[in-house]
Image (cartoon, grey):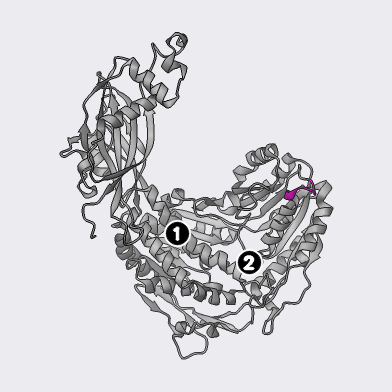
Amino acid sequence: MDFLSLNFAYILRSNMSTPFVQHYVLDEWIHDENYGDELLMNAISGDPVARISKQDLDFESILEFSRTVGNPNLRKLTFQQRGLMLKRLALHLLKHKEKFYAASWATGATRTDAWIDIEGGIGNLFSYASLRRQYGDQPFAIEGAFIPLGKEGSFGGQHILTPKLGVAVHINAFNFPVWGMLEKVAVNWLAGVPAVVKPASATAFLTEAVAREIIASKILPPGALQLICGPARNLLDFVDERDVVTFTGSASTGMHLKSHQRLLSHSVPFNMEADSLNATVLGLSTDPTDPEFDLFIKEVRKEMTVKCGQKCTAVRRIFVPDHLIDQVQEKLSDALSKTTIGDPQVDGVRTGALVNADQKNEVEAKVQELLSEAELIYKHEQEPIGQKISDSAFLGPVLLRNNDPENAVKCHDIEAFGPVATLMPYHSTDQVIHLVNKGKGSLCCSLITHGAKEAFDFVQGSAPMHGRILVLDRDCAKESTGHGSPLPLLTHGGPGRAGGGEEMGGKRGVNHYMQCTAIQASPTMLTQITQTYQPGGNRNEANPHLFQQYFEDLIIGDTVTTAKHTVTEADIVNFANVSGDHFYAHVDETSLDGTIFEKRVAHGYYLLSKAAGLFVDPKKGPVLLNYGIEQARFTKPVYPGTTVGVRLTVQDKIEQEKKDPEDIRKGIVKFYVDMYDESGESVAIATILTMVKCRNQEA
């Protein structure tokens, strides 16, 4: 079976038997057959699967199109709109996932391999769609709280994050043609920045298949995505200070790109995620009878065989206590021997092929280098299973052993990007920390142990040289995503050899595509600029009461100033009895010697409760419910006899998505609660969240 027989007739665009992979640039699909082409081969059958044109494109115009068309279109959308756009796109791609699975077969991937790539990539869109809830309903973001810069409170600062004015240029590796694109574009689109994606040629046909569905969906605004499937020799000659460049691939290629004169002269942010010498460690406290021992064998076997070892996070170095190394060697060799390689469409096959014959040759050459200071202890000899297969890209697991990792060099420096790993002994936690750190910076490592002290010491010593650490034991094994699985809301990257960058990471990743600017002004002006109420800003008295106004009618800064109440000892005693909070400072005035309190003090939670009693309008209205409390602080002791009042101010508001057609339109309103005493000083501050009905239910 070849690529064209897998329901992919829709990609045929020429009279030739092998289709061209096209570019999507300047709002159209193009290719030019007059520049020669490169054949891409099916990793399983060895048949031609697609062709890539060698034409040079007008990269200056392509980047400018993203800046002048895509950037304004995304930039004008709010975080909520961009997040919902990602959700719609993810749902659309899921409907078409079987097309992508069919195409993925030609990359040598099994269904499990493809699931990581395809549905894992789509999962990034879902994750970043959900992340919108951590932002406001503006095109920009606010970072941190208002910072007072003057004694009288009339001058302060606020950091804001605005989308960069350029384009995110993503240069991706061959091993994850779907994930590699979607993990990055999900982040830059949420930030409000368009993308130009340059996938590696070997698997660009799969990236193109997904990009076609993205474009066909018409969910993204024009210019949000451009795709370059072919040479991009001088692409970086035209980036500038408005742009961001990311790279995933080999450390050597990454360093070459990172030193590009254009990036240096224009201070273009460059995020690099490079393949690294990732390690896994069996804890020193582990016994062969412990569950962790079996978990370790399973995890290493999985990491060596999933994607045929072609993962930037795959295990390359295996460290075990020296007294267990022979047992681990035996168990691991036995587990690897059960690996069935061949055509992934054949039942029982668990490992497919490397991406092509060139990659297999490169891996085998690296193995020979490693063997100069290690011994071969296991090599998979089984012939690939399948009717029509070419063995030119198949390579079974290879396990090496190096008994002197302290003096070894190559095992800590050379990566065979395939199902290859080296087993090594260690004798102490301090030593294994030293050994894993000899990788000169890694994307991830894992420690399999049930010993908390061992885990603490290991993390403290190895974290500075790793982007991510998995501590795996019996308690988390059922839900663990494993050593090699980056997650969208956790940072993916690492120091040193791993590139020094970070991808994804939730809001941390979004910040890469935004400019942080400190705005200095009066609180009133900052309220207008940030569209979020800033403490000390002017308040307009609300009419009618805020709880009687619909979501659309509420204006940032509008305030209800309440009646006042004098706190009594009876209030404190009654609250203690109702709540059960009999902390000595509230109920025993004889115990206050040596404390900061002059006399019995009101409960902080009483103050919040009393604040609600003062500011709530009890009549039925658009307010549906109290949604939560944020950032509650009790700033000054309140004693019996103190008179307090409350100012309730509209701080921010975000309309919610309707879950279904029967759902009512509503939004979340944040109210700033400021309780103050007779001197005007704040005694309690909080932000409460309420769910408020929209006036217009038809929109």
In this picture, is 59 found above or below 678? below
Residue 458 % position (x, y):
67, 41
Residue positioned most to the bottom: 15
Question: Which image quarter: residue 301?
Answer: bottom right
In this picture, is 655 found above or below 38? above
Magenta part of the chain: 287-292
Q: Is residue 376 left or right of residue 12?
A: right
For image coordinates 39% across by 67% down, the residue present is: 225
Q: Residues within 10 Å of mark 2 (few under 14, many from 20)?
A: many
What kind of residue is marked 1?
Phe
Residue nearer the viewer, 604 or 442? 604
Main structural element of the magenta stretch: helix, strand or loop?
A: loop
Query: Which residue in the protein does label 1 denote?
Result: 126
For image coordinates 44% across by 63% down, the residue present is: 236
Q: Is residue 661 left or right of residue 345?
A: left
Q: Residues within 10 Å of mark 1 (few under 14, many from 20)?
A: many
Residue 529 % position (x, y):
25, 43
Q: Is residue 95 left or right of residue 357?
A: left
Q: Secondary structure at mark 1?
A: helix
